[in-house]
Amino acid sequence: MAKPVLHGPAFSTYVRSVRITLAEKGVDYEMREFNFLEGWPDGYESLHPFKKVPAFEHDGMKLYETPAIMLYINAGFGGPALLPEDAAMRAKTLQTVNVIDNYAYDALITRTFIPRAVVPMLGGATDESVIEGANSDAERAISVLDGMVSGQDYFGGTDASLADFHAVPVIHYTSQISDGQTLLSKAPALTAWFERMSGRESVSSTVPQLG
């Protein structure tokens, strides 16, 4: 069986979620890294027609969309099961993934972390009005995630799952800026969860380097 190939930059939260999943399953893979801020590889549309990251290839199959890639890795390779058997808990993992994708990412990354950290790194000026406009949505996202993991070790219950690997990169970037640190200071369950997750080899070995 050929090694899977992962396309995208290591700084991407979505690429990192896939890398964590591959590490948790013990899968050897090839990383074809590029920086889309500097341009897209020739022909990338054949891997991802919407030119997003990551893209994934394995045994002649091309796949995109992070949750789909993570589900494939979980089902297609040996190693620990990364979804709960219990129907309710499995549904909760999918709910967590959707909360991240539909609400948390936009508020915490697109409208808070990027203008606060990435724009200045690239030589631009932070637009405080963008961050202020995201405040209520960011607070709600953190509060909801805190409630979802309260009373249990992981989003899927007693064991780490795809939901946790999807959430970690977003909370990591959130924790790197003062705005996010303020939000997390009001979310004890989420903060404790992030500390637990940060101690996993799959997470500590994939911390991105920015700047």
Image (spheres, rainbow, N blue to C red):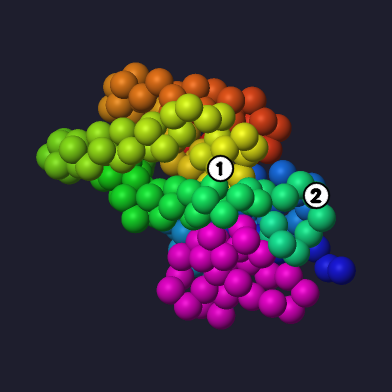
The quadrant the N terminus occupies is bottom right
Name the amino acid type tagged 2.
Gly
Residue at 54% in and 47% down: 89
Foreground pick, 3 / 85: 85
Q: Position of residue 66 (x, y in %)?
A: 53, 60
Give the quarter of the image for residue 178: top left
Residue at 57% in and 38% down: 157
Mark 1 lies on residue: 156
Disc 1 secondary structure class: loop
Residue at 18% in and 38% down: 136
Q: Eyeballing the image, is 160 above or below 191?
A: below
Q: Eyeballing the image, is 31 above or below 120?
A: below
Residue 62 inside the magenta-drawn segment: yes
Horizontal side of residue 19 vs 27, given as left or right: left
Q: Position of residue 126 (x, y in %)?
A: 22, 37
Q: Eyeballing the image, is 108 above or below 36?
A: above
Residue stretch rendered in magenta on the structure: 45-72
Q: Position of residue 168 (x, y in %)?
A: 51, 38
Instruction: Please say whether residue 168 is visible from this viewpoint.
Output: yes
Residue sitting at the far front: 87
Number of marks present in the image shown: 2
Give the quarter of the image for residue 72: bottom right
Residue at 57% in and 54% down: 87
Give the quarter of the image for residue 139: top left
Mark 2 lies on residue: 79
